[in-house]
Amino acid sequence: MLKTCTPVNTSWLVRSSGFMVVAWLLAASCTAPQNKQTKNDQVGRAASDSVAAAIRNGFSWAKAESTATVKPPVLVSHVFIPRFPTTKMFGVWALDLTAPHADFWLDAESFYLAEEEEEGNRPYVIEDDSIKIFYKSYTSKGRIVRATGDTLVLRLNGGEEMEYMRWRE
């Protein structure tokens, strides 16, 4: 048996402004093209087209890699769970207090070597009692043996222990 629907009086819906907004939104979504490309699709297609054109014109990845400029990552100094308080490690340090200048300055931002005036700031990482100092061409690895506030004992690159004294200004 079929049920018949009785018509409902919807004139109150037409009069409400909310219904008009909903109706307009439904109509707009129904008429929107389903094949709309996003900006990412367009960029991706352009990139793949340019790669295909480069390959057709004799592009070589080997040539590109040999001539590419490699930028090193930007390193920022970090201290992770140090074995010694940073107040006892940070400061200006010298092997010989009678020397005309200190050897290095260690603070939260960098390891500054006094000998290298232009490029003296080096990023570093301290974790527990290990320290890594990042130079342009290599990384110096070592161990912080002792930090008392007046002395800082380091063993870098497997060498012997060096006892630095806090520089008095």
Image (cartoon, grey):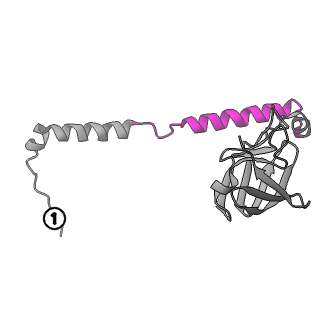
Q: Nearer the viewer, residue 90 or 33?
A: 90
Which corner quadrant of the image does residue 154 belong to?
bottom right
Amino acid type of the residue that numbered disc 1 sits on in the rendered structure: Lys
Judge whether 23 appears above or below 146 on screen: above
Which corner quadrant of the image does residue 158 belong to?
bottom right
Q: Nearer the viewer, residue 2 or 98?
A: 98
Judge whether 46 appears above or below 152 on screen: above
Task: List the residue tagged with mark 1.
Answer: 3
Q: Nearer the viewer, residue 40 or 148?
A: 148
Left or right of 101? Residue 108 is left
Report the span colored magenta.
Answer: 32-61
Residue at the (87%, 35%) spot, across then down = 64
Left or right of 110? Residue 70 is right
The quarter of the picture where the C terminus appears is: top right
Structural crowding at the residue carrying mark 1, measured as other residues with C-alpha within 10 Å and reported as few (<14), some (14–19) or many (≥20) = few
Does residue 129 show up magenta in the picture?
Answer: no
Residue 153 locus on image (x, y percent):
80, 59
The quarter of the picture where the N terminus appears is: bottom left
Q: Nearer the viewer, residue 122 or 2?
A: 122
Residue 35 locus on image (x, y percent):
51, 39
Residue at the (78%, 44%) spot, across then down = 104
Residue at the (24%, 41%) spot, across then down = 22
Residue 54 locus on image (x, y percent):
82, 32
Residue at the (78%, 54%) spot, across then down = 132
